[in-house]
Every structure is written in C-alpha cells, then in structure tokens.
Amino acid sequence: MSERFYVERADRGLMTVAGADRVEFLQGLISNDVARASGERAIWSALLTPQGKYRHDFFLLDDPGAPDGASRFLILCEAGDRLMDLGMTLRRYVLRSTVKLDIARDLAVFLVAGKGAAAALGLPETGGAARAVPGGVAFVDPRDARAGAVVIAPAEAGRAFLEEAGFAPGNLADWDAIRLPLGLPDGSRDIEVDKAILLENGFDELGGIDWRKGCYMGQELTARTKYRGLVKKRLMPVRVMENGASMPATGSIVTLGGKEAGTLHSAVGEWGLALLRLKAVASAEESGKPLEADGVPLTPAPPDWLHLSRNGTADETA
C-alpha cells in the first residue's frame, strides 16, 4: 500500500440543502450546531428519531462549488436506500420553510489517508478543516484528524487531483485498518438504526453533539442519558489476542466467561469495533479474563479519547 492512498466510496451519497431557511431548518433537526459548518469547516452530526434513537449520521459543510455561487450545504451520508430515507425524512419537515433538497449525482466521494494526507491536500491536520479543491471540496475528518480526510469532486477530476497530489488507489480495508483502532464508527455498519443512542457511539467525545444549541428532534433522550449517567454500553475497538488469528465475522456475539458481553460490528485483520457492556469491560480488566467471539480471545482497546472509570462507566469528568 502506498504511503498515501485514496478510496472512492460508491456506498456514500451526497445531498444538498439550499434556500433561505436552510440553517434554521437543519438546526431544529440535527444534533450538532449548524452555525459551526462553513466552507472552511465540516462537522459531524446525526439525525434521530423523535424517540431519540439513531437514524442517520453524516458530515455537513458549505459547498464552495455550488453553481452560480449559490449558498447550499453538502450532506455526506450513506448511499442507496439510506440516502433515500434521509431525503424522505428531511422532506417531511420542510413544511413552509424556504428549503430545497436535492441529490448531488455529479459528485463522487473519496476517502484519503496516510502520512501527510491533510498537508498534501493543502489542509492543516485539524479535525474539520476544509477548503475548496478543483471541482469540489476537501475536509479533514472532524471526529479525529488521524483518520484522514475526504475529497468531494466529480469522479474523474477527483481521481486526477488526488493522483497528482501523490495519492495511490487503495481499498476500504486500508482505511478500516486506520479507523478501527481509533474507535470511529462507519455509519450503519457500526451503529444500529432505530435502536442505538448517540452516547453509546462516541458522538459526545467526537464532537457530534452540541449541548448549547436549541432543541432538536430526539434531544430529550440524549440529554437525559448524559445527565443521569445512563450509558451502559459503548462502541469501542477490540483486538485479537492470538498472533495470526483473524477477527470473527461481523455480528458475532462477544462473551465473557460464557455470558453475553456485546456484539461485534465491522472488523478487518486483528481489529474490530464492538458494542460492549461496560460492566463486562470492567470485569475483564479486573479478572484478567479475555472476551471471546466464536472462540477467538479478544481484548478491549479503548481509544485515547474514551475515558472509562474503574467501574467501567464513561468518565464524564475526563
């Protein structure tokens, strides 16, 4: 694999949000502060169900390449049925707002990563930093700059720009090998739709929630979960303990001493992401016993941004 690589993601789609009321419209629906997004800054956010459960997550920023200099947001989300569902859900709330939603079919999405990836794009290694590039925009992953960056541009122009900047074609497993140890979820590959809550999946620590903004759909459950300390599970990296062993299949049940401790989500090589009961994580640490999935011993490997107290709960003071 090249020192710097790019991955063209056909499983990602783009929606545009234009119109005079676009800021107010999104502000009342999503978990982050829309006012923080600009052509120079991307944010990570989520759309919840009215009951406060995860429905979609996405990156959001101003589109510097909008036709005729028009002001519009770009939403980078999952493609296919997931993109259609996001569009239908947002349209349900337009009502009398001056907002136009559309799908940007002429743009492609490229993940870029590797040593010096941000600098090669003319960006600082700062989460969320964004700038215009030929035909589109580039931004550093706002959750963790170590995960690399994203380029949005017409497919042919994007490939040419990246290869000129010193990036070689890679594959999704190359990027997974970077993001999994960092504990970064990849949409519904890792977060269960209509069931998961944001605080189980790193949205607080990784900047996907703004606690000072006004109300948004599903806010009540999110706030109650935080302030009452109700988080009992967390999505976190796990690592295979045996040399040469591979991570079990996605969906495998993780156990501790024969009792269910969680579920394995995406995985590559010796790394995976699992939604684990925090008490099981604490018990594994105290007892020295490994977690297991399909007979493969695993060890929890919380990333540096996830601070757990001695009883396994998330440490809100860290």
Image (cartoon, rainbow, N blue to C red):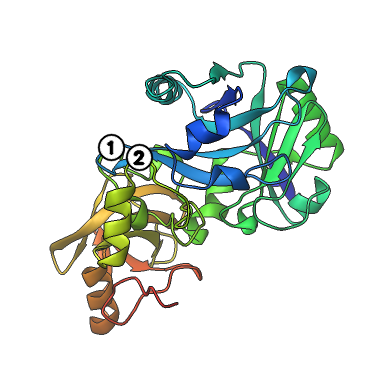
Q: Amino acid at mark 2?
A: Met
Nearer-the-camera pick, 174 or 127: 127
* One can see residue 57 in this view: no
User: Who's the residue at 28% across and 71% down the image?
Assistant: 281
Which element carries disc 1, helix, strand or loop? loop
CA gap, disc 2 and disc 1: 6 Å
Which element carries disc 2, helix, strand or loop? loop
Task: Please tell me the numbered disc located at residue 217.
Answer: 2
Q: Are marks 2 and 1 in contact (CB under 8 Å)?
A: yes
Res. 238 image quadrant: bottom left
On the image, the x and y values in percent for residue 35 come to 60, 44
User: Who's the residue at 38% across and 73% down the image?
Assistant: 316
On the image, the x and y values in percent for residue 85 come to 38, 23
Task: Please tell me the numbered disc located at residue 50.
Answer: 1
Q: Amino acid at mark 1?
A: Pro
Q: Residue furthest right?
A: 164
Q: Is 67 situated left or right of 180 in this image?
A: right
